[in-house]
Amino acid sequence: MPDTAMILTPSPSRASAARIGIGGPVGSGKTALIERLIPVLAGRGVDLAIVTNDLVTKEDAERLRRSGLIDPARVSAVEAGACPHTVIREDPTLNIAAGDALEAAFPGLDLLIFESGGDNLASTFSLDLVDWWIFVIDVAGGDDIPRKRGPGVLRCDLLVVNKTDLAPHVGIDLPAMLAEATAVRGGKAMIATNARSGDGIEAVADAICRAVLFAP
């Protein structure tokens, strides 16, 4: 583990788990990001569980359960039955209930991750559901995504620009895309990642630990 990695000492006084959201368009790499984060966070002593959201299936939950990275019982699935943003923004009741059930089943959880179903650039999380949230876009989606100034890109606590390895294959000037994203966000946090190889994952874990787990 890099010297810069932070080790969390779980606090027995924490009344409930910190709750974070991970959203973004279909195929941007949300589930792949979570798969990379699970062992990194576990290695730092973070006790976590996950709630996934899909339209009418449990595909993302089943993928995580089969991964061997986490106890399958720690992964819960919500079927939105409508636009994915409905159950993370307008009425997050189903997600809140799923999170509460996981906390009851696993007392002492440090972190609950809510993965939104793939949605558009307007997708945001209700602060009734999460304390802090990440929005994932990918290089293959186009270098104009930052310029479109979608609420997800602008309002998230951390913007993740994923699939950086694809830039030369899809004709993207990656430094220019990252510079535009930084500019439209007014300098708010952004991390470039390649979830497939693991590049940038430690930095995302650092951001989570600082923001909601208050790791040293």
Image: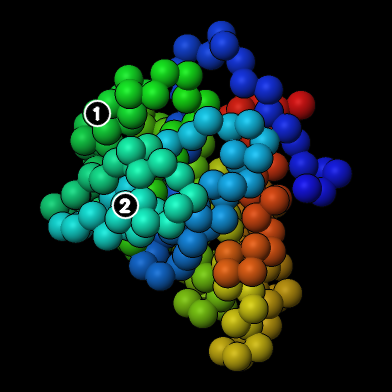
Q: Residue at x 45, y 45 (%)?
A: 70
Image x and y of residue 44, in percent:
67, 36
Instruction: In the rendered view, tell whether residue 197 sits above or below residue 102.
Output: below
Q: Residue at x 65, y 40 (%)?
A: 43
- At label 2, the amino acid type is Ala
Q: Which residue is mark 1?
A: 97
Q: Residues within 10 Å of mark 2 (few under 14, many from 20)?
A: many
Q: How many marks?
A: 2
Image x and y of residue 203, in percent:
70, 50
Rounded to the nearest whole Å, what is the CA distance between mark 1 and mark 2? Answer: 16 Å
Observer-nearest of 200 and 182: 200
Depth check, mark 1 against mark 2: the one in front is 2
Observer-nearest of 183 and 25: 25
Q: Residue at x 78, y 48 (%)?
A: 1
- At label 1, the amino acid type is Ala
Q: Earlier in the sequence, mark 1 or mark 2?
A: 2
Direction from residue 202 to residue 101 in the image, left or right: left
Mark yes or no: residue 87 visible: yes
Image x and y of residue 116, in percent:
35, 51
Q: Residue at x 47, y 12 (%)?
A: 15
Observer-nearest of 84 and 198: 198
Instruction: In the rendered view, tell whether residue 146 sits above or below residue 155.
Output: below
Q: Residue furthest top?
A: 13
Instruction: In the rendered view, tell whether residue 75 sits above or below residue 61.
Output: above
Q: Quadrant of the C terminus?
A: top right
Q: Secondary structure at mark 2?
A: helix
Q: Which residue is mark 2?
A: 61
